[in-house]
Image (tube, helix red, strand yellow):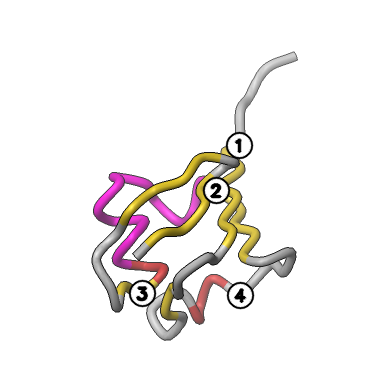
Amino acid sequence: MLITVNGNPENIPGPTSLADFLSAKGIHADGVVIELNQDIPEKSAYTEILLHENDKLEILRFVGGG
């Protein structure tokens, strides 16, 4: 199925949970903020949230610096 990740189209197998998607990408949920279809879901719900065709996912990473 096709979703958009940070503005880029990406094909993923479905059904895929948000937690499984992040894990497959090597992304740790503690170091990012996720926006899914203009909503910021609770991290505790990542395993329950299934990604669907045409979902828009933004992954924002925390970066230290000064």
The residue tagged with tag 2: helix, strand or loop? strand
- Please tell me which residue lies in front, 12 or 42: 12
Gap between marks 4 and 2 measured at Cα: 12 Å
- Res 12 → quadrant: bottom left
Could you tell me how far apart the alpha carbons at marks 3 and 2 are, in whole angstroms?
Answer: 16 Å
Please report contact status of discs 2 and 1: CB closer than 8 Å, yes or no.
yes
Q: Earlier in the sequence, mark 2 or mark 1?
A: 2
**Label 2 belongs to which residue?**
32
Q: Relative to 47, does residue 1 appear above or below in the rendering?
A: above
Query: Which residue carries the number 1 mark?
Result: 62
Instruction: Name which residue type carries label 4.
Output: Glu
How far apart marks 4 and 3 lie (CA) works out to 14 Å
Quick check: 55 left or right of 11? right
Alpha carbon separation for disc pair 2 and 1: 6 Å
The x, y position of residue 37, in whole percent, is 66, 66
Rendered image: mark on residue 42: 4
Q: Residue at x 60, y 50 (%)?
A: 58
Q: Residues within 10 Å of mark 2 (few under 14, many from 20)?
A: some
Badge 4: how crowded within 10 Å, few (<14), some, or many (20+)?
few
Give yes or no for residue 46 being in the magenta stretch: no
How far apart, in angstroms, are the residues tagged by discs 1 and 4?
Answer: 17 Å
Reading the image, the residue beneath label 3 is 17
Q: Are marks 4 and 3 in contact (CB under 8 Å)?
A: no
Sequence-earlier tag: 1 or 4: 4
